[in-house]
Amino acid sequence: MSLKPTQRTRAQESRAAIQRLYIAMRHLFIRGNYKPLGVSGEAMIEALTQLRPEIYGSVSDPERVELDGLFYIFQRLPKGIEECRYIKLISREGFEQSNFEAIIPPKRRRNAYRIDEEQMLIEMTRGRSDIYDILTHLTFMYIESEKIRRNSEDHKERKRREWNMLKEIVHRESQGEEYNKDIAYTYLSTLLGRTYEETVAACERFSSDPDVNSIFHITYWLGQLATEEVVDDIDREISFSSALREKIGHHYYGEQWAQNIKAQLDKLNLLNRPIHIISANLHSVMNIFYARAALNDHGHIDELDDTMRELSLGGNSLLRKKVYQYALAHGMYQVDDTSGTNISVQIFDTTALNKLLLPDELSLDKEYVEEHQPVILVMDYAFGEQAYETMDELLKPFELPGQHIPLDIQSVSIMGKAGILEGGKGDIMVPQAHIFEGTADNYPFENALTVADFEGHGLKVIDGPMITVLGTSLQNRDILRYFRKSSWCAAGLEMEGAHYQKAIQSASKIRKSINENVKLRYAYYASDNPLISGQTLASGSLGVDGVRPTYLITLKILNQILQG
């Protein structure tokens, strides 16, 4: 049956909900503060509930608390935030010099400071995407807190016996006292609106991460603050410092970051050499160059795949440290971030590599390296719009008093994690364009990497445009199916590609600060498939499944760089 002209598809409704969220967050940021359950906050809650993002699972269910989604956000929010009535987002404003202890979430490296029992300050130094990301997570948190409050009350709005027992359990837990876990799970399952089995699984998952409070603790405090807001009229509030509102969008941190890197290149006498930029993690390139040499006396298998898999195992930190120390002594330079971007950098002088101790899988043209002496600059992952800020500043000439020194950028390679739309975790996507969701901005480019480069390795490889989204937490199946099944034929979604390409095109085509024919390489490996149940980001990390695609992409990038 065909749709009437005025009838909107579910995908169109979802895209409209994303736009409402995006506009509301920008408005509230400019305004300076809002109450999550006030008029403005309710508008965001309504849009998020209508959108039903995959990563937030049962967010639209009025009773069932979404446990995987809660675990996902609490790995990305500062520990103890569930206890705080007042949350303030700030820029870097000197608190790192104070006596407040910095709280750093395990999955989002940003500093937070617990000022007192009720207030948390969170540094936002990675651009607008970082702000939208945390506001989305907080909105979801408040939705779930209201479910807990409602589940804790009877039809006369009196607290249930289970709530009072939970309070006792949380007290005992804080004192390190024993309690009957089976009984505790039973009480908790009622307050969460979940089965006993689901509750036990959630408790075990939360307790597995020392940087996240227990689900008992989180449930109690979310429900307690929600109750106080309704019963005692004590509102929760989110605010933004004036310094943050003033600095956002002006490349304040990106400019400092890029200047530090160029100063280090100058100090090392590498500034005038051919430079190849790679955006990736800070272990792949280092391990490929140095693991074999550093671990030569350990009798390790020479197969690159096996060595990299062994290095990725949790209990092998001493081996990773050995590789790192060896790298620092043989041509690698670490530039840790001090600007606030949280993007550290590694610089590799390829002339210092021991050609005899490189892995067999690495194809290096010795004459090319000796003649051109390429420098490889690996920058850690940016976050959303921060990719534009950092890459735009990095590609500008190095400015010294009376000097204007352009960088000889030969190539820019982007290796990232992304959600795949046809395939599974660990598969590879090779794009020829980035589409910026919600805008008319499309960025086609000539990719030096091809599907053929990755075939024959036991992984599925697909091509097609990548969708650069406002936030992975805002995507739902209807929108993603549209991008995959329509004429877009999108391969996947991520948050940085269009921002990187915008900066590269500006530098090469408009400003002419780098070579117009700079070589580009983009490849992504799948961290999740949001179209398949149980394979969203909230279902857990890739683990060892990410080792093969990570090193395969890195190897292909390095082979092209070192062969000229």
Image (cartoon, rainbow, N blue to C red):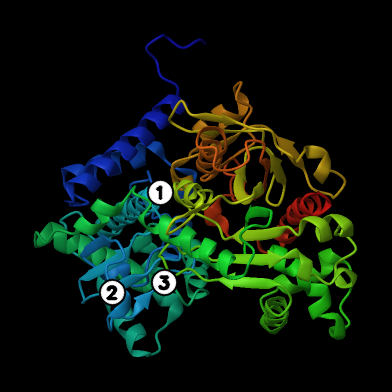
Query: Which residue is drawn at the image coordinates 52% and 11% (left, top)?
Result: 1
Q: Is residue 4 left or right of residue 304?
A: left
What is the x, y in percent for residue 159? 20, 65
Which sits earlier in the primary sequence, circle 3 or circle 1? 3
Identify the residue position indicated by label 1 in the image: 129
Q: Nearer the viewer, residue 62 or 349?
A: 349
User: Residue 426 at what x, y percent from top left?
Assistant: 71, 52
Q: Which mark is residue 95?
A: 2
Question: Marks 3 and 2, Cα distance to the nearest angstrom?
Answer: 13 Å
Q: Residues within 10 Å of mark 1 (few under 14, many from 20)?
A: many
The secondary element bearing badge 3 is classed as loop
Q: Earlier in the sequence, mark 3 or mark 2?
A: 2
For residue 161, which numbered disc appears in the image?
Answer: none
Q: Amino acid at mark 1?
A: Ser
Q: Residue at x 68, y 71 (%)?
A: 332
Badge nearest the viewer, 1 or 2:
2
Mark 2 secondary-structure assignment: helix
Type of the residue with mark 3:
Ile
Query: Which residue, given by chain and number where applicable, does mark 3 sit on?
Result: 104
- Residue 232 lies in what quarter of the image? bottom left
Q: CA distance from mark 3 to mark 1?
A: 18 Å
- Residue farthest to the left, as pictured: 232
